[in-house]
């Protein structure tokens, strides 16, 4: 199981082990973005199968994973994705990937048969050829060259230089002046400014590339970035606008200082800011770094309601309000639930009310996490068959339990077999699994009658059926 740890400043060396060679060219695959936006996305990381796995989290979106970042020649992306899937099953959530490189989208869509894919224009990165920003060559960049020439004519003593830890006071002085002229009211823009100021305190770290244009001891513009694979990712570009031409001068100077030998410069997204979009487009990006959001779904996504399924003696359908007393008795039966392998006390969410178990079953179906079939004999609830633990790749687990007064009549086996048939041949699963305790001989015989053995451990016998 993945062992996630919060991303902190001290995590930089571990992350750079992966990001320094990353070929995705998206700004999210960098230490700077993880640190800069950690208060917003609360990122955590784990290492698995030679890959970096990052889980981001927000209160309204839940867990969102980055695409695994492999060590070249060592990382096994599919194995890391298997670990993500296992974590999601354990935590009752669907795998969601928030910034998938465009070239990896098909891989995830092949892996997960049911997906929802989004490509939000607001968050696409601006990618420029490094040579273009270093030279500004050709007629198409004449405007940038004119601005730079004017800046140099107006401020001939201004010069670019690298920043070090010793420049902290000068950098803070720059921020103070920049804050005075900052006039954007957008909440995200204000947050970005605050986060950028904090990130500049990393100047001097080995992974940080930082520079400034200085005039008479005063910083007129600052930039901070890092190199990821063949790409210079620019996290911060700020300048005092009263010094005309300082922005293109800074862009070119920073590119020349750190872009030699690289193919790309990523100046990140515009977050929908009109001014930023206009500015970034003026530098003529060679392409846009799309960030694909892929949300895996399971076979339940096609169901609006729980169907009615019949066998020779039984009916399987949705739980009803009138089932509450019998269903509570089923769910609270500690002796039989011991064989079910479930203790409701461990997962109790809030107060145990009369309608608690019905509400949980209905919520799980609404969230497409499970189907709780009521097993009925002559219209009366005598047990349940539960399809759950969807792996989002065509598989799920099936379990069945019957009230004690109806045990010994084959109802459990009949309900289980019919639920399995429905799952595989009507819902469309390709693999069904089940398990039972070694001591539960009746369940072992039932499972062996309709599934094939699939190993054992110290606690369980495992079974599966593949179609």
Image: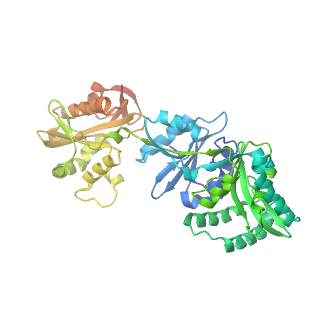
Task: Report whether 462 appears left or right of 266.
Answer: left
**Residue 210 shows in the view:** no
Q: Which residue occupies 30% across, 61% down?
A: 351
Question: Relative to 16, is 159 above or below?
Answer: below
Which of 335/8 is in front? 8
Q: Nearer the viewer, residue 208 or 270?
A: 270
Quadrant holding the C terminus? top left
Residue situated furthest bottom in the rendering: 180
Judged from this view, the residue extending furthest toward the front is 139
Give how far across and how far down residue 31 sits, in percent: 66, 52
Residue, x 80% and y 47% (percent of image)? 137
Q: Is residue 418 above or below residue 138?
A: above
Q: Is residue 339 above or below residue 453?
A: below
Determine whether, in the image, residue 16 is placed left or right of residue 444. Answer: right
| Residue 144 location (% of width, % of height) | 77, 55
Residue 419 horizontal side relative to residue 272, left or right = left
**Among the 4 quarters of the image, the one containing residue 47:** top right
């Amino acid at each position: 199981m993945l062992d996630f740890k919060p991303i902190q400043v001290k995590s930089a060396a571990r992350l750079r082990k992966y990001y320094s060679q990353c070929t995705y060219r998206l700004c999210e695959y960098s230490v700077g973005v993880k640190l800069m936006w950690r208060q917003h996305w609360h990122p955590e990381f784990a290492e698995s199968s030679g890959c970096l796995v990052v889980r981001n989290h927000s209160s309204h979106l839940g867990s969102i994973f980055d695409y695994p970042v492999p060590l070249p020649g060592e990382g096994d992306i599919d194995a890391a994705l298997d670990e993500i899937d296992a974590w999601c099953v354990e935590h009752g959530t669907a795998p969601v990937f928030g910034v998938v490189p465009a070239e990896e989208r098909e891989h995830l869509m092949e892996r997960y048969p049911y997906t929802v894919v989004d490509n939000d224009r607001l968050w696409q990165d601006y990618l420029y050829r490094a040579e273009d920003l270093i030279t500004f060559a050709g007629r198409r960049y004449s405007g940038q060259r004119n601005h730079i020439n004017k800046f140099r004519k107006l401020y001939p003593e201004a010069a670019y230089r690298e920043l070090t830890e010793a420049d902290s006071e000068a950098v803070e002085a720059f921020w103070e002046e920049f804050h005075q002229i900052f006039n954007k009211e957008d909440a995200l823009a204000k947050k970005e400014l605050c986060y950028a100021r904090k990130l500049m305190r990393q100047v001097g770290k080995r992974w940080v590339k930082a520079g400034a244009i200085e005039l008479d001891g005063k910083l007129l513009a600052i930039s901070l970035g890092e190199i990821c694979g063949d790409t210079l990712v620019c996290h911060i570009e700020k300048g005092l606008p009263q010094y005309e031409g300082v922005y293109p001068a800074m862009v070119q100077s920073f590119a020349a200082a750190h872009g030699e030998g690289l193919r790309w410069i990523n100046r990140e997204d515009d977050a929908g800011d009109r001014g930023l979009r206009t500015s970034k487009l003026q530098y003529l990006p060679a392409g846009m770094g799309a960030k694909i959001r892929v949300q895996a779904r399971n076979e339940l996504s096609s169901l609006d309601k729980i169907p009615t399924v019949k066998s020779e003696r039984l009916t399987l359908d949705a739980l009803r309000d009138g089932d509450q007393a019998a269903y509570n008795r089923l769910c609270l039966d500690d002796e039989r639930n011991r064989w079910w392998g479930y203790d409701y006390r461990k997962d109790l969410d809030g107060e145990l009310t009369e309608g608690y178990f019905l509400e949980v079953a209905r919520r799980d179906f609404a969230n497409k996490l499970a189907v709780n079939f009521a097993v009925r004999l002559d219209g009366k609830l005598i047990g349940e068959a539960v399809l759950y633990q969807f792996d989002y790749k065509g598989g799920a687990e099936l379990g069945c339990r019957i009230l004690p007064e109806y045990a010994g009549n084959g109802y459990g086996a009949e309900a289980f077999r019919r639920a399995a048939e429905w799952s595989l041949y009507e819902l469309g699963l390709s693999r069904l699994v089940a398990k039972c305790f070694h001591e539960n001989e009746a369940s072992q015989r039932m499972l062996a009658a309709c599934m094939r053995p699939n190993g054992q451990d110290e606690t369980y016998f495992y079974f599966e059926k593949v179609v």
